[in-house]
Structures are given as C-alpha cells and as structure tokens.
Image (cartoon, rainbow, N blue to C red):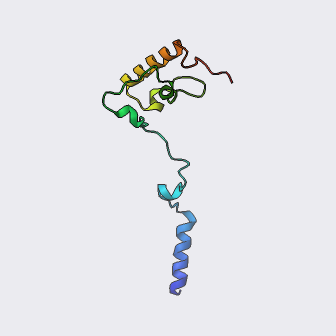
C-alpha cells in the first residue's frame, strides 16, 4: 500500500464509527441554543448615591412598567430588593393620584 492509500484507509476508519464532538462555539455559532440566564443590570440612574423613586415623576416610573401597566419583577428590572419595594410604593402612589393608569385597555 502506498502512503496515500494508508492515509485514506485510516481516515475511513475514523469517520466510520467515531463520533467527533465539536466545540461549543463551533456547534452554535449564532448563539441560538445558549442559555440567556444571569442577572440583569439595573439602569444606571438607579445606581447613583441617594437615588430615590419619586411618585410625582411618571416618566421615570413608566420605565419599570410593562405595556399592560404591570410592575416589572426584580429579575427583569435588575433592582435590589429595597429599590423594588420603593418602586412598588411609588407606582402605587402615582396610580392613586391618577398619574399612572391601573391597567391599559387596548
């Protein structure tokens, strides 16, 4: 056997029954199957020292509401527990004095 025939024979043996696993990046180049877990980052304006939610500022509060008017949960908003409680209180106060709607009909 010549060298080419030996190389070809050894290649056939490898491809016949051996499973070659691809690297994770090669197997999923677009990132479709990758998990999208992890914690979300809070908006930068909430990271300022002494920041407090103001119920009289509906534009700022609307950032944390869904299109239906529901308050976004912590895992989505990225706020701390204390900030989330302050947000909830501010949204409820703004709803009470009609700066924000309770629900959006649409």
The residue most toward the left is 49
Q: Residue 91, position in %: x, y?
A: 48, 19
Q: Residue 80, position in %: x, y?
A: 37, 27
Q: Nearer the viewer, residue 79 or 47?
A: 47
The residue most toward the front is 56
Q: Is residue 13 left or right of residue 87?
A: right
Q: Residue at x 47, y 28 (%)?
A: 60
The residue most toward the top is 96
Q: Residue at x 41, y 34 (%)?
A: 42
Number of labels in the image equals 0
Q: Residue at x 51, y 74 (%)?
A: 10
Q: Residue at x 31, y 27 (%)?
A: 50
Q: Quadrant of residue 87?
A: top left
Q: Residue 43, position in %: x, y?
A: 42, 35
Q: Is residue 43 above or below residue 68?
A: below
Quarter of the image with the C terminus is top right
Q: Quadrant of residue 44?
A: top left
Q: Residue 14, position in %: x, y?
A: 52, 68
Q: Nearer the viewer, residue 54 or 75?
A: 54
Q: Nearer the viewer, residue 92 or 2?
A: 92
Q: Is residue 99 above or below residue 13?
A: above
Q: Nearer the viewer, residue 102 or 23?
A: 102
The residue most toward the bottom is 2
């Amino acid at each position: 056997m010549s060298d080419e025939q030996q190389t070809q024979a050894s290649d056939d043996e490898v491809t016949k029954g051996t499973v070659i696993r691809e690297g994770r990046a090669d197997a999923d180049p677009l990132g479709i199957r990758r998990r999208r877990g992890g914690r979300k980052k809070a908006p930068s304006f909430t990271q300022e020292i002494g920041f407090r939610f103001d119920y009289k500022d509906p534009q700022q509060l609307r950032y944390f509401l869904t299109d239906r008017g529901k308050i976004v949960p912590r895992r989505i908003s990225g706020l701390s527990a204390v900030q989330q409680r302050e947000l909830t209180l501010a949204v409820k106060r703004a709803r009470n004095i009609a700066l924000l709607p309770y629900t959006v009909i649409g």
